[in-house]
Amino acid sequence: MKTFSRFGISSLLLVTILTWTLAACGGEDSTPKSSSSGTGVTVHLGYFPNLTHAAALVGLARKTYEQELGPNKLTTTIFNAGGDLVKVLLGGNIDIAFLGPDPAIYAYVQSKGSVHVLAGASSGGVLFVVQPDENINGPNDLHGKKIADPQKLNTQDVSLHHYLQQHGLKADDQGGDVQVIATSNANTVSLFKQHQIDGAWIPEPWASRLVAESKGKVLLDERTLWPDGKFVTTNIVVRTEFQKQHPDIVKAFLKAEVDTIQYINKNPAEAKNLANEYLASVLPGGKKLDQQIMDSAFDHLSVTYDPLAQTLYTFGDYAYSVGFLKEKPDLTGIYDLDPLNSVLSSQGLSPVTASK
């Protein structure tokens, strides 16, 4: 208990992190995996089936990561949200992960620096979508409503709680009358269609699915809450031990990420198709999304290796302000951008910074 309390983690977050860590001790996540063939070091990669993880989807579809890793073997595990991934990451069964800012913060704080953020991966791509017939036109209309987000304590959960707080509202878990329901993104789509929830604070492509398939109304694009419309949605996170053991592999992975992001930005149509096909290959049903949904989703986000560090620090402040952290987290050292900047320098690209 002393390890957790020294970082000022709330009792709710403490229980959650203990659950994540204890679960991780039992072995790898049970989600089905795909892997490449070859010999050498096995690199365990975790990601979400969201378009905010487009760099993962496109890079895996093009086999860019596998090619850069050479003789090393790449295995992948799909997760619904950050908490699920963190428990396996801290258990040592994931080496590199695409992960949202708040779970990255919790992992760094709880583990006393055994994970680091290496790069960004996406910005934006999160919407607050509500039922079209519920007369929800602003925060004052949210009293008594049921709002879904992907998982307790994940980044969208923090953003939703902070949004409510900013408008004098509280979630039911904090004594308020706005019921926040943590559930998988796929289940949110079903609940929304069945009119069992009034809205959802949710990443792409699930947000655009609510609009296209259920005539959902976009109450808020989260980009409008941030300076210049930019905020980190996804980071590249590594276990520090793995990085120390295999710095060349980490650098190769980052080179693949930079190459993938450049490919996506230069070839948006092809990237959308690759991401769509890859999602169809890993999600139940095996069905590609309509082009309308893909176009809408990509319009709401951008892919970038810039970690947008200031926004991660702000997410830490938000987690504190809504009571998920008892103290503002000390995030000194959460970033290790030297490997990324080495890759960028070799390609004549400008370096990125972790400064506030």
Image (cartoon, rainbow, N blue to C red):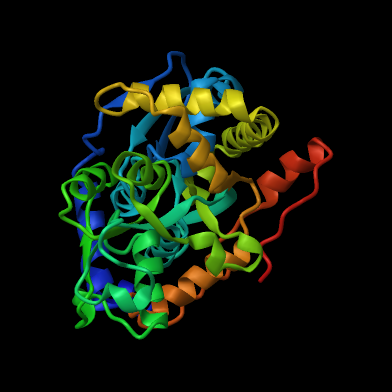
Query: Residue 167 at x, y = what percent?
Result: 39, 82
In the picture shown, does residue 172 fall above or below 246? below
In the picture shown, does residue 344 fall above or below 57? below
The reply to whether residue 60 is visible in this rendering is no
**In the image, what residue occupies the spot 33% across and 80% down?**
323
The one nearer the camera, 304 or 19, is 304
**In the image, what residue occupies the spot 20% across and 78% down?**
177
The reply to whether residue 251 is visible in this rendering is yes
The answer to whether 134 appears left or right of 259 in the picture is left
View extreme (top): residue? 37
**In the image, what residue occupies the spot 25% across and 27% down?**
284
The one nearer the camera, 247 or 12, is 12
Query: Residue 107 at x, y = what percent?
Result: 39, 60
The one nearer the camera, 205 or 103, is 205
In the picture shown, does residue 221 fall above or below 4? above
Q: Quadrant of residue 168?
A: bottom left
The answer to whether 309 appears left or right of 173 in the picture is right
**In the image, what residue occupies the spot 48% across and 44% down?**
52
Query: Residue 347 at x, y = what percent?
Result: 80, 35
For the C terminus, the quadrant is: bottom right
Q: Quadrant of residue 182?
A: bottom left
